[in-house]
Image (cartoon, rainbow, N blue to C red):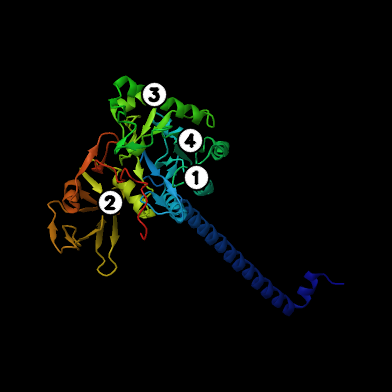
Amino acid sequence: MMSMEESLYKYPLYYTVYRRNALSSSKEIRHTMVKFLLKITLLCFMGATVAISFLNAFKHKELYRDQVAVLMYHHIHDKDRSSGTITPKLFRDQLTYLRSQGYRFITLTEFKHFLQGSPVPDNAVLITFDDGYESFYNLAYPILKELGAPAVNFVITGKLNDSRSGYIPFMNGQQIGALSVDEGFIEIECHTDSLHDKIGGEALLTHRLTKKGQEETDSEFHARLVDDTKTCKRRVRNYFPENGDSIAYPFGIYSEAAIRAVSEGGIKYGFTILPKMATRNTDPMRIPRINAGSPSIRPETLHNMIMRRVSAVKHPHATVPLRETMEQIGGDLVKDEQSGNLIIRYIGNRYMITEDRSSVTDLGTGGSLKLARPMKLMGSRIYVDLNELQRILKVSIYFDADTRTYTTRAPLESDVDVEIMKPYPKGY
C-alpha cells in the first residue's frame, strides 16, 4: 500500500488538489482564528464597559458630609388623618427614595458617637419617632426591618401600662419588650413619663403648676422634672438597659430650667423640632430635627427639604458648580426639550439661562436678569458666581462655619406645629 507522499508524487493532479485544499483549509483556520480572537476582544471590551457602567451606577454620591439629617415621625396609618400621620406606603416610598439618592441610615448609638467626635458616613440620616404609638410596632417596624433602616422611638413611659388611654393606641410593655430583640437596630428613649401634656396651653415640662392657689417654687418645679426623668429612664432601661439617656422634648418645648432638670435626671441628649442639620458643634441638649412625618411630604420633597438645610461646597474662586449647588440647596438644573437651553428650578420657580450664559429669564414673570459675571463652562461643568446665584434665586446663601460650606438660611421656627397630632376635622 502506497504512502500518502508516494501517492501524491505518482499522481500530481491529486497533489495539486490536495495542496489547494490544504491551503484553503489553512486560510479558513486562520480566518476562523482571527474571527474568534476578534470576538473575544469585543466581549472583553463589552464586559469591561458593562463593569464600569455597573460600578458608576453604584458610585458613591456625596450630598453632604460630617453632618446628620435627623428625621422626625409620629404616627403611621392607612386611615387615620392628621398633620403628623402618614401612610405606610408613603413611609416606605420616602425611605426607598432616600436610599436611591445615596443616603445612609445610622443608629442612635452611631449618632451619639458622632457628637462625641467619631465619623459618620456621608449623607447620614437618623430616623426618630415620637410618642411610642402602637403603629410603630405594627406598621413602621416591619418596613424598617425590610429596608434595613434603624430607628429610635421616644416613648411616653407612663402609657406602657395604659396603652389604650388616647385616641391613638400606644405600644404596651410586651411590644416594647419584643422590640428589644433588635436592640441596637431599634432603640427606645424618653419622651417623659407623665409630662407630655399641657395645662392652659402651657407645657408641663416648662410650666410651673399651681396647687390650692399656690404656684410651685423653683425647687419644687426642678424636683418634679428630675423625678419624672428618673422614672422615665428607669422604665426604659427595664427593656433597653443601655438606653434612657436621651429625650425628645414634648411639643418641642423646652427651657433652660427644664434642660438643667432633665440633665440632673440622667439625660445627655435632648431632641428639639428646630429644622436644621446636626453638626459636630450641635449642642447635645438642643439637637435639631427635620419633620418628615406630614402627609404632604413626598419622597422628592423630603430630599429637597434636607438639601435646603445642607451647604454647598465653597469654590476657591468664589464660584460654585451650578448643578451640584442647586441639588444641594434643594433645586436642580435641567435642559429644556424645546429650546435646548438650561433651566434652573428652585422652590417652584424656573429660570432659563441664555446660550451665552450672560443672563437668565424668569419664566414665571418674564423678567430678564443680566449677569455682571457670566457663567463659565469649565470642563463639563458650568460655574456661577455665588453673588449672582443669590440674585437669581432671590435667597441669601451664607457660609456655615460648622461645615465650612454654603447653605440657604434655615427658618428660625419649625416646619411642624406644636399641636402636630391634633386630628383633622371630619370630611378632610
Q: Position of residue 265 (x, y in %)?
A: 41, 23
Q: Amino acid at mark 2?
A: Met
Per the image, the residue denoted by label 4 is 188
Would you say residue 367 is visible in this rendering?
Answer: yes
Crowdedness near tag 1: few (<14), some (14–19) or many (≥20) residues, C-alpha within 10 Å: many
Q: Find residue 378 and name its label.
A: none
| Residue ranking furthest to the front | 212
Q: Find residue 134 and name its label.
A: 1
Q: Find residue 326 and name its label.
A: 2
Callout 2: helix, strand or loop? helix
Q: Amino acid at mark 1?
A: Glu
Q: Is residue 128 above or below residue 28?
A: above
- Nearer mark to the viewer, of 3 and 2: 3
Q: Amino acid at mark 3?
A: Val
Q: Which residue appears at 52% of the width and 61% of the height?
A: 42
Q: Amino acid at mark 4?
A: Ile
Residues at circles 2 and 4 in contact by the CB criterion of under 8 Å: no
User: Which image quadrant is residue 370 in?
Assistant: bottom left
Per the image, the residue denoted by label 3 is 226
Callout 3: helix, strand or loop? helix
Q: Is residue 387 above or below residue 156?
A: below
User: How many numbered badges does the structure rendering display?
Assistant: 4
Earlier in the chain: of badge 3 and badge 4, it is 4
Q: Which residue appears at 32% of the width and 19% of the height?
A: 219
Residues at circles 3 and 1 in contact by the CB criterion of under 8 Å: no
Q: Position of residue 102 (x, y in %)?
A: 42, 48
Q: Is residue 328 left or right of residue 111?
A: left
Earlier in the chain: of badge 1 and badge 4, it is 1
Would you say residue 288 is visible in this rendering?
Answer: no
Earlier in the chain: of badge 1 and badge 2, it is 1
Q: Position of residue 372 (x, y in %)?
A: 12, 52
